[in-house]
Structure formats: C-alpha cells, structure tokens
Image: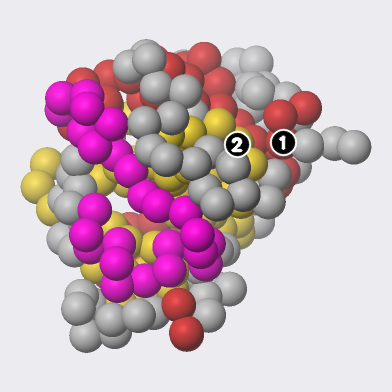
Amino acid sequence: MTTRDTLPTQFLPIPGSDPVEWRVEDGLVDYPDALAFMEERATAIRAGTAGELIWLVEHPPLYTAGTSADPTDLLAADRFPVFQAGRGGEYTYHGPGQRVAYVMLDLKRRREDVRVFVAALEEWIIRALDRFNVKGERRDDRVGVWVVRPDRPPLPDGAPVEDKIAAIGIRLRRWVSFHGIAVNVDPDLSHFGGIVPCGVRGHGITSLVDLGLPVTMADFDLALEAAFGEVFGEVT
C-alpha cells in the first residue's frame, strides 16, 4: 500500500527554472491582507508575470476555517477573529510565535500531483526540525507533522503520546499553490484551546520551545531555508 512515507521526498522544478523568491515579513500581517496578496500573486504566477514565492509571516491571534471545517470544532467563537480561509482542511490557529510559510509554487513546472506535493511539504518541515534534533513524523490518518512525547505517560491503550507541531493546508488554482504550512516555534499554546485543531481529537499541540529548545524565529527561518533548498530547489 502506498503511504506518504513511500512517496518521493523532492519536488524539484524543471531544469532552467528561476530560483524561488524567499521573503520574510517583519511584524504581524493581518490575515485578510495575506489572503488578498496570495490571490494576486497566484494569478500572476500562472500568467507568467511573477515568479514562485515563499512568504514567511506571523499573524495576530486568529482562527481560520478550511473548506472541511466542522462548526462544532469551533469551541470559543468569540475568543479571536475567525476567518474563512478557502484552503483545504479544518480549523487552525495562527498567532505570534508561529511561523507561517505561504507556498506559492507552480506545480506545472514541478509535478502535477497533490499527494506528492503534500508529502514534500511534510518532508520540508521534518528536515527543518531535524536540524534541532527533533524527530518529526508523518501519520497517514492525520495531515501535518507530529512529535512522539516519551516524556509523557502513555495513553490508556499503551500508545505513546503524540503532539502536533506543524499544520499543512493548501489550495491549488490552475496548478499554482497558495496557503501552506504553520510550524509552532513559540506560540501561546493555550490559544489552541478555542478549537479542535484540524478536527483531530485526543492529541495535543507542542512547539519547539515547549519541547525545551530555546529556538528563535530567526534560527528556525534559517533551518527552513536550508531544508527548502533540499526538497524544492534553489531560493533567492
């Protein structure tokens, strides 16, 4: 049976493609502004008037609802603003201390395969975490990247505790991607309590700092950039 662990781990462009633009935004970006920018950039990429882009941002505290969001998973609707994201997936949280990377790539220059693309995004996160000796893992029944917690008592059935450290939610338009990934560096983890993150019950949320690693956002950005080059190709 094919699993995401057996899919290709690279998603390289065709030879001769321009490097991907890498942009880190200062300050907090309002979510509606980010949506508008991604829509415009994805259209321009398909038209050939702009290049591929990885856009790294932080948002003020908010919840987003994907196209599969179950209203019963919004546990505290009045806690933070709630936005309809238009991406795949369910509810998620964004806020300071979480690195959001919006991924605007032309899959026609790479591979028109959504499953391989999602596996490559997971691989990107896993390789970035590995630079801090954190073992991120995939789960075929749960999108995102997970960390086993041997420091926590096992579950009643004896299974180890697993916490989510990164979420993935994408959208494609004419094979150009937007939205992307969110990795918990040092967010306020209590803010996830207003939702059932990604509709997954029975598991917790963690971050690099929660795991005992004093990682700064700048540290993690360097790891993301290096790992991106391995999986997706050159950046500028």
Query: Looking at the picture, which amino acid does disc 1 mark?
Result: Arg
Tag of residue 138: 2
Tell me which residue sits at (78%, 37%) in the image.
3
**Nearer-the-camera pick, 94 or 14:** 94
Tell me which residue sits at (55%, 52%) in the image.
156
Q: Is residue 137 visible?
A: yes
Q: Is residue 192 magenta?
A: yes
Which of labels 2 and 1 is toward the front? 2
Tag of residue 126: none
Residue 222 placement, left or right of 167: left
> Where is residue 57, by image quadrant?
top left
Range drawn in magenta: 189-216
Pointer 2 or 1: first along the chain: 1
Q: Is residue 184 above or below residue 233?
A: below
Asked if the residue at tag 1 contacts the one at tag 2, i.e. Cβ–Cβ closer than 8 Å, the answer is yes
The residue that mark 1 highlights is 4
Image quadrant where one finds the N terminus: top right
Q: What secondary structure is marked by label 1?
A: helix
Tell me which residue sits at (47%, 23%) in the image.
135
> Where is residue 220, by image quadrant?
top left
| Predominant secondary structure, magenta span | loop
